[in-house]
Image (cartoon, rainbow, N blue to C red):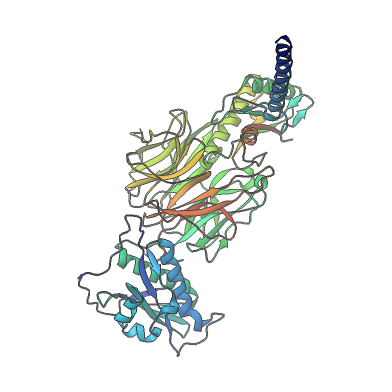
Amino acid sequence: MRNLTLTITVFFSLIVNSNALIEVDITRGNLDPLPIAVSPLHVDIKSEEYKELKVKELGSEISKIIEKNFKNTGLFNPLKKDAFVQKPDIAHLKPRFEDWRLIKAQALVTGKLLVKGGKLKVEFRLWDLAAAQEMTALAFTTTPTNWRRVAHIISDKIYERLTGEEGYFDTRIIYVAESGPKNQRIKKLAIMDQDGANTKYLTLGNELVLTPRFNPTNQMVTYMSYFRNMPRVYLLDIETGTQEVVGNFPGMTFAPRFSPDGKKIIMSFAKDGNSDIYTMDLETRLVERITEHSSIDTSPSFSPDGKFIAFNSDRSGLQQIYVMRSDGTKVKRITFGKGIYGTPVWSPRGDLIAFTKMHKGKFYIGVMRIDGSGERLLTENYYQEAPSWSPNGRVLVFYRETKAGDRGEGFSAKLWSIDITGYNERRLSTKSDASDPSWSSLLSK
Amino acid sequence: MKLNSNLKNVLLVIFATLVLSACSTAKKSGDIDGDVYTGKETVEYLAAGVPDRVFFATNKSSLTTASRATLRKQATYLRKNKNLNVTIEGHADERGTREYNLALGERRANAARDYLMTYGISGKRISVISYGKEKPVNPKSSPLAWSQNRRSVTVKVN
């Protein structure tokens, strides 16, 4: 991720005065998605061959990725290309606005690219068709093999311009890839782009691995492994592949996450039938005990400012969600609704906590304010848990399992996402069964 | 009239027999008391008459009377075999969040370990490991399977 050299330059002095430009409201379920035309990017005829890349098709491939990203948000309706009325290169220079309006498009994306001297140069423009004006324009230079990321970055810039919120397309998801029969599951750490492309496996499946989570810069992952049948929290450097056990605990450590500054790992340590929450500073190796209670304390998650921790405890008898200061003081129960609650995860915006709720044999993913008020259940199912936030705090990814028959047949585990509006529930494409997803932050920030 | 009431009695007896036999089959295939598994279908044995596992109620780690009896048999067996060490594996069913279930499995394994220790088995001979919901013995999604999966299993390590 670090080796990507990406230069982004604003290449037009934009005449953006804010008279009646299009805006997309993402705070409510969008039943009327914005019609948008994504023109294939024009491939400059001076382009050269590059390794196995089909350079001539790059322009159309990039536009397809952008369209898919937009469609998946539920906020945009990418229009069919066969209705397009202008050649990509001409539209990119200056669209005939009235013609594009005829096909009911409200926004238009145009662009061009050049592959030359081992570099990929891409530029794009976003046009407001009603106002007949350009909204944004950017140019990038990168290595040609990064072309998918270019498509995601363009998607992010357009999403940002139209919604006023940061995008989440140039991101990855780390998860546990599952295979094999239900009572002999093989589990591997896997990483993929948020759209399901570029799946890579980080472990071989020789030992059980669970609950991977990114650090804030997405270079490190903390997870739990049963390596040598010793269930412990591990730290993995994705680029070098180096792994190490976190701390020197005489028993099971689990449920790890990074602190928002990436300097500590917070996790549970189980001993003599009791699980408490600990942190370890990755630099000083200093271990701190945060909770000291005879109940199960687990699933800790820091607030983005690092001042508070949400966690799961059964100190009241059954699983409930609690919030405390990051030093373990001022513990306060925040869930009092019907049923039991687990897996609290603090939103990157700081305003909400996502959770799993179990009630009358059903599992729900929901969000609530950090004091436990305003609970909203987003989705109900036979089994689902482990929400993880998109970096802009608008979407949750989680996993869902199906019921199994006598010999475990019919069982599957898949990743799903849903907007915090409760709309736009959809399954993520993964190469195999999948669980325990964790969403990265934006890669090119 | 008389004949009629006789017939009624006969019918009642037949009906009662049917109900009773239905009950006994249900109990046989059910094997759940409260929601603790009481059957033997999944049980293995450390030695003749020494079951290897005990079962738990949903979200609980308390030992039932039957579980205590099983663990006392294990303790007797371990006292006789002084060089034998064991690992107690703690498990949960699939109807709970993964991380909490890891903690719950650990708590269950320790409940069994503590009981063996009160019957004179040294803690040094008993290690514990929790698998949470990761290793179901019965893969089915049913109350019976879940009750079989909520267990602690004593496994010989040497």
Q: Is residue A165 toward the left or the right of residue A257 in the image? A: left
Q: Is residue A261 depicted above or below B110 in this figure? A: below
In the image, farthest residue toward the right: B48
Number of marks in the image? Answer: 0
Q: Residue at x 74, y 19 (%)?
A: B14
Q: Position of residue A381 (x, y in %)?
A: 50, 45
Depicted A292 relative to depicted A212: above or below: above
Would residue A161 appear left or right of A40 to someone viewing this image? left
Q: Residue at x 59, y 29 (%)?
A: B110
In this picture, residue A55 sits left or right of residue A23: right
Question: Can you give x and y, in whole percent of width and height, for residue B91 in the image?
Answer: 61, 36
Is residue A386 at all visible to an observer of this figure?
yes
The furthest residue to the bottom: A46
Q: Quadrant of residue B92?
A: top right
Up-down: is A339 above or below A178?
above
Percent across and percent down for residue A88 are: 40, 83
Q: Which residue is the extreme one toward the top? A: B2
Residue A295, given in percent of the width and then of the height, sits at 47, 30
Foreground residue among B65 and B110 = B65
Residue at left offset 51%, top offset 41%: B97
Is residue A123 shown to the viewer in this render?
A: no
Q: Quadrant of the C terminus of chain A?
A: bottom left
The relative height of residue A329 versus residue A86 in the rendered view (above or below) is above
